[in-house]
Image (tube, rainbow, N blue to C red):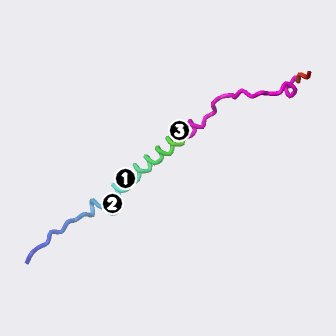
Amino acid sequence: MEQEEIIDNTDKDFAHNWVSSSRFLFYCQLVLVFALLTGGCYGLYQHRYKGKPEVAVPANTLYNPQYK
């Protein structure tokens, strides 16, 4: 009678080992939050306020209007 070798993979399986799977998901969440924060900051930096533009204002609409 030939005996078969039984291989136990329950410790290596993602679904069976609660400690390693929760640690893996925690680190995935940290990487995801870091990536979202970095992307959001970069987007805000790209669309930042670049300063006061030079706008031509007619002289008759100033606080002290100047008429001809």
Instruction: Kindly check if marks 2 and 1 are in contact, taking CB atoms under 8 A apart as contact.
Output: yes
Say if 29 sits above or below 61 in the image.
below
Residue 56 in the magenta stretch? The answer is: yes
Residue at label 1?
24
Q: Residues within 10 Å of mark 1 (few under 14, many from 20)?
A: few
Question: Cα distance, mark 1 to mark 3?
Answer: 27 Å
Relative side of 48 to 18, left or right: right
Q: Position of residue 52 (x, y in %)?
A: 69, 28
Q: Residues within 10 Å of mark 2 (few under 14, many from 20)?
A: some
Dot 2 amino acid type: Phe
Residue 23 in the magenta stretch? The answer is: no
Q: Residue furthest left?
A: 1
Identify the element where label 1 is drawn: helix
Q: Nearer the viewer, residue 65 or 37?
A: 65
Say if 22 sits above or below 37 in the image.
below
Residue at label 2?
14
Residue, x 85% and y 24% (percent of image)? Answer: 59
- Please provide the residue range marked out in magenta: 43-64
Dot 1 amino acid type: Phe
Residue 55: numbered disc: none
Identify the element where label 2 is drawn: loop
Q: Nearer the viewer, residue 50 or 33?
A: 50
Residue at label 3?
42
Q: Earlier in the sequence, mark 1 or mark 3?
A: 1
Q: Answer with the quarter of the image where residue 10 lies.
A: bottom left
Quadrant into which the C terminus falls: top right
